[in-house]
Amino acid sequence: MNTKPKGRPFDKCFIDADSIIYRIALKDITLDLAKKYYDEEIENIGWDTCSSDIAVAVKGENNFRYNIEENYKGKRKRKEEKNEDTDPKLTERRKDLNEYAYSLGHFKSDNCEADDVVSIWAQEALDAKAHFVIAHIDKDIDMIEGWHYNFNKETLYYVCKDQGYYNMCIQMLTGDSTDNIQGLVGVGKITAKKILADVRKPDMLAKVQEEWKKAHPDDWKERLETCWNLVYMRRDWKSFHRLNLEDTLNVSV
């Protein structure tokens, strides 16, 4: 049985529910039971974070990242297609559950991803100096300043502004194999941490650029820009397109 955490309740909780829907859709169960499981998971997150106001984002239609890289999430798509071959009704269950979420007023993340939406909500909350928490299981969102709640691990943690910036720079070096985002060859998280060890925050992006220049002297800027555009969580509703490297250097994280 869940118990509310001690301390000040959060004013707002922003939930990226994509993984919840997919996990439930993997179960060969009736839609009514799937709806029940979904409602319970959302309610439990609100309870666990002691939040007075909950906003939920789920998958929508289209995604600007495919205009940047057509093979974005290629590996994940193949895995999902394999699951659908094994369970032909998986797509239908997932679609039905998404429709149910829309009917509840949960945000349909058109032209972007649910993690972009919760990141934008978080930025708006930061600007308003609200006490909020982001509920998710996605490492990409760890570049966002604020409280985070991993509902799979049931862990609450805080990401400060400098840590969020560092996390972004790490992903600019490693890319993301899960989403088929090309980083530097041979650079995983451990190597990326070594590259940025003892590098001051004002020098981190320059260090990232230096590593890309060494690996790809002829087209490093385009490659780096593509990697960053794919991993970077958007902070406003007008940024669902390819941003240039100057935007990276001036970005506020």
Image (tube, rainbow, N blue to C red):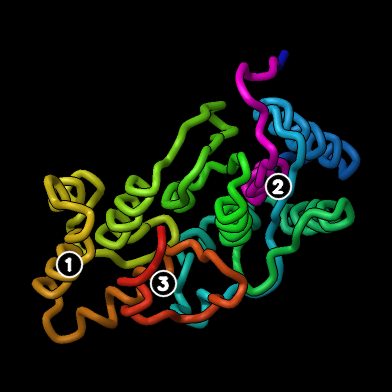
Residue 250 to residue 7: above or below: below
Between circles 1 and 2, the one closer to the viewer is 1
**Which x, y percent locates residue 189?**
25, 47
Residue that label 2 marks? 21
Direction bottom: furthest residue: 218
Pick the front one: 221 or 33: 221
In the rendered view, does 138 fall on the left or right side of 44?
Answer: left
Q: In whole angstroms, how far apart are the C-alphas of marks 2 and 3? A: 26 Å
Label 1, on which residue? Answer: 206
Does the segment drawn in magenta span residue 20?
yes
Q: Earlier in the sequence, mark 1 or mark 3?
A: 1
Q: Is residue 205 visible?
A: yes
Mark toward the start of the polypeptide (1 vs 2):
2
Would residue 219 be counted in the magenta stretch?
A: no
Quadrant where the C terminus lies?
Answer: bottom left
Q: Residues within 10 Å of mark 2 (few under 14, many from 20)?
A: many
Q: At 73% from the left edge and 48% from the top edge, which residue is drawn?
A: 55
CA–CA distance between discs 1 and 3? 17 Å
| Segment tinted magenta in the rendering | 3-24
> Mark 1 Cα within 10 Å, few/some/many (few <14, many 20+)?
few
**In front: label 2 or label 3:** 3
| In contact (CB < 8 Å): disc 2 and disc 3 | no
Element under disc 1:
helix
Name which residue type carries label 2. Answer: Ile
Q: Nearer the viewer, residue 244 or 17?
A: 244
Residue 236, given in percent of the width and then of the height, sits at 57, 68
Which residue in the protein does label 3 denote? 229
Amino acid under disc 1: Ala
Using the image, tell me which numbered label, if any, was put on residue 142. none
Q: Quadrant of the N terminus?
A: top right
Residue at left offset 79%, top offset 34%: 37
Q: Earlier in the sequence, mark 2 or mark 3?
A: 2
